[in-house]
Amino acid sequence: MFLVLCSEIFFVMVSYFINKTIDTPINNWAIKFLVESSGYKAVKSNTITDQVKLYYGNDLVEINTLSNSIILQQKKTSSSAIFSFNEKSKLEELSFDIIEATILLLTDKIHCNLNKEHYDKHNRLKGSCSYQFKNGSIQKPIVNYYVLLIKNSIKEKFLLTPIPFYPKDYTCVVVLSHDVDEPDRYAILKRQKEKTKHLNFENKLYYAWIFLRKYIRKIIFGGHKSYWNFEKILALESKYGFSSSFFFSAKSRFEKGSNFKLDNSYDIDHQEFQKLFSSLNAKGFEIGLHSSYNANTTISFFEDEKNRLEKIAKRQIIGNRHHFWNLGKNEDQTLLAHHKSGFKYDSSIAFNDCPGFRRSTALPFYPYNSENNITLSTLQIPNFLMDTNLVNDEDEEEIVQKAIVFINELTKAQGVASINWHVRMAYPTDKKLSLYARVYMKIIEHLSNTKNVWVTSFENYYQWQKEREDLINAQ
């Protein structure tokens, strides 16, 4: 669909060998990630031959046999050394183990010794408690530079040209996305009383309070459609030739198993959503699942919500993003549930309280599950900017410039990452939220004037990524 190849592009395999003392599934996973993200097919060799292009280990006899191979030595690796890397670093001069560093960052094992006070009440790592923040690298996707180092080393040493990161002349990708939280400002007033019977006493009191508050506000201030910005967002983004992804809740706060205080009030079965889904489908915008707050507690929640949204939206749902970024206390188990539920991609790993790259990457990856020693099939696509973690008390132009710094870093690192802007905040319909909207509109305008940046939806990017993977794996 995307890739138009010229005659100078060659498809090549890179054979690698791991010393038997460290030949573990997770080390193989990390090498495959680095090599295949670079645009080459990683093929494991069980014997040392002159075809081996990359070696990982410290055995001097083996190293001396491989006079023409790239040598990756196992080294003692500290967190500070990982972040000391810069774009001018050379592979042979690294003071740390690039394989171990990749594992520590992509699996988040680098934070495995933190305590619960380092996380907020929604199980999200506080940005200020992260190693990225402590090492001044929260805005730098350092794993990208590991990949670029491997890519350039292979290309220069063996004169092999990799499959490009992106189609055409694009050098990076910004994915536009919108979490759909309470697009109907007064959804809680719509025929919900029959759904409250199963609520406990505390939640019934809470329901009565917010019902009364919303009812009075509607009478005094109106603004029924002040959060319903879908058509305006479509027009804004389409003007620049962009498309985006919208993540909808398929389970409201009134359903059994929901978190009544935190989940959304709207019901996608209402006619207005059915009309909206038809419009999004017709105009080439993506519909994804905004899984409920408690979805991480059982795989059946994912499956039920995904199936319901597919039925009502009349399309396949390939992507997910968690409400509140809540992956639960055991993120590995939740990522495994994505895999078992059949999601093609997820985009829920992010800092909530500050912009940045949560696992120090702006490249997609298939997470490794240590408990089962398997690579999961659900692609994880990073985030780097969100409305509420970018917009603060600073001047509007200062906020926009801060976003541009992150976009420039993404471009420099040749990465892909998502901007998440809630629907109610993406267009200046509501006066109190207009600053968020103005900032978003200026970011969009900036992106339209930035050369070689592909601005698109998750779905479009995922289709390209699968084509790239198929070409790599076909070798």
Image (tube, rainbow, N blue to C red):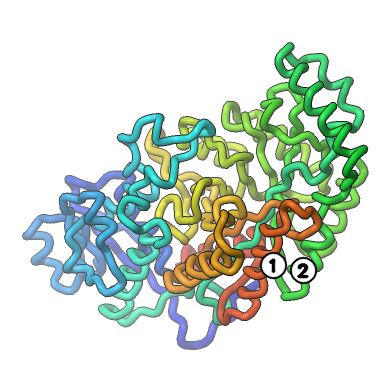
x and y percentages locating residue 68 in the rendered image: 18, 74
The percent position of residue 227, horizontal first and vertical second, equals 80, 50
For the point 27% across and 74% down, the residue is: 88
Where residue 19 appears, as percent x and y from the top left, is 18, 52
Furthest residue toward top: 201
Answer few, some or many: residues within 10 Å of disc 1's Cα (few below 14, many 20 plus, some between 14 and 19).
some
- In the drawing, does residue 217 fall left or right of residue 43? right
Q: Nearer the viewer, mark 1 or mark 2?
A: 1
Establish if 194 lies above or below 386.
above
Residue 295: quarter of image: top right
Q: Quadrant of the C terminus?
A: bottom left
Find numbered disc 2 in the image and state the secondary structure of the residue it sits on: helix
Query: Which mark, by number, is residue 453?
Result: none
Q: Amino acid at mark 1?
A: Met
Q: Determine which residue is flagged by label 2.
A: 236
Q: Is residue 261 above or below residue 126?
A: above
Horizontal side of 470 relative to 254 (left or right) equals left
Q: Is residue 218 left or right of residue 14?
A: right
Residue 115 appears left or right of 194: left
> In 3D space, how far apart are the residues under numbered discs 1 and 2 (Cα atoms)?
8 Å
**Residue in the image at 30% along x and 64% along y:** 15
Residue at image point 66% right, 63% down: 440
Question: Do the CB atoms of the residues marked 1 and 2 lie less than 8 Å apart?
Answer: yes
Q: Earlier in the sequence, mark 1 or mark 2?
A: 2
| Residue corresponding to mark 1 | 441
